[in-house]
């Protein structure tokens, strides 16, 4: 997997993890051995993963290979976007000034809250009855 001129980035969102490798190429993207349209099934998610490449104007300069697991399709797409952004910064540190202000290098910290004892869910308590 690791070629001489390849760059790596790990992206995360909720329980989804994406391992991303960038290498010099023509802009081909592969997610778990499939094209983004076959894997994600939604145009909006396809555009989401291209956001870091479009912001840095490197869409035609790198081939992207992604291995992702965990979570759902939307969480995986955001994890891929995060991983691509981190790999781009590894490729060229000047991209940090472009991707940082757009919030593409920041991991989204929101995760599902655990269930607490005495409650039916994370926050939903037992139904109260006065009588």
Image (cartoon, rainbow, N blue to C red):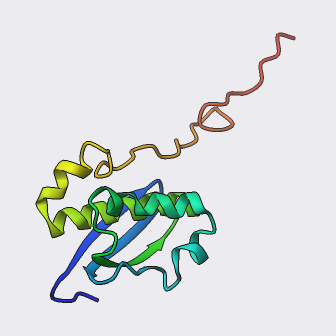
Image location (x, y in percent) of residue 12? 39, 59
Residue in the foreground of this view, choosing between 55 and 22: 55
Q: How many marks?
A: 0
Please say whether residue 55 is visible from this viewpoint: yes
Q: Quick check: 71 above or below 14?
A: below
| Residue at the (60%, 77%) spot, across then down | 38
Q: Is residue 126 left or right of residue 12?
A: right
Residue at the (21%, 89%) spot, across then down? 3
Residue name at image x 58 percent, y 41 percent: 115
The one nearer the camera, 89 or 131, is 89
Residue 93 drawn at (x, y percent): 12, 60
Q: Is residue 72 visible?
A: no
Residue 96 vertical placement versus 37 (above, below): above
Query: Residue drawn 32% across and 51% down?
Result: 104
> Residue 111 at x, y = what percent?
48, 46
Residue 45 is left or right of residue 54, and the answer is right
Nearer to the camera, 113 or 4: 4
- State left or right for residue 72 relative to residue 110: right
- In the image, is residue 112 above or below residue 80? above
- In the shown orientation, is residue 40 left or right of residue 100? right
- Looking at the image, the residue that sits furthest to the top is 130
Q: Residue furthest left?
A: 93
Q: Nearer the viewer, residue 16 or 59?
A: 59
Q: Which image quadrant: the N terminus?
A: bottom left
Where residue 97 appears, as percent x and y from the top left, is 17, 49
């Amino acid at each position: 997997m690791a070629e001489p001129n390849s760059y790596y980035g790990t992206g995360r969102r909720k329980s989804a993890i994406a391992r991303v490798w960038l290498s010099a190429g023509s802009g081909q993207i592969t997610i778990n051995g499939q094209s983004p349209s076959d894997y994600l099934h939604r145009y909006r998610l396809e555009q989401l993963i291209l956001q870091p490449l479009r912001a840095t104007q490197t869409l035609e300069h790198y081939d992207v290979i992604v291995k992702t697991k965990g979570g759902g399709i939307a969480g995986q797409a955001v994890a891929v976007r995060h991983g691509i952004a981190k790999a781009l910064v590894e490729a060229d540190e000047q991209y940090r000034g472009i991707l940082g202000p757009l919030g593409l290098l920041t991991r989204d910290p929101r995760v599902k809250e655990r269930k607490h004892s005495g409650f039916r869910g994370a926050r939903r308590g037992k139904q109260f009855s006065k009588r």
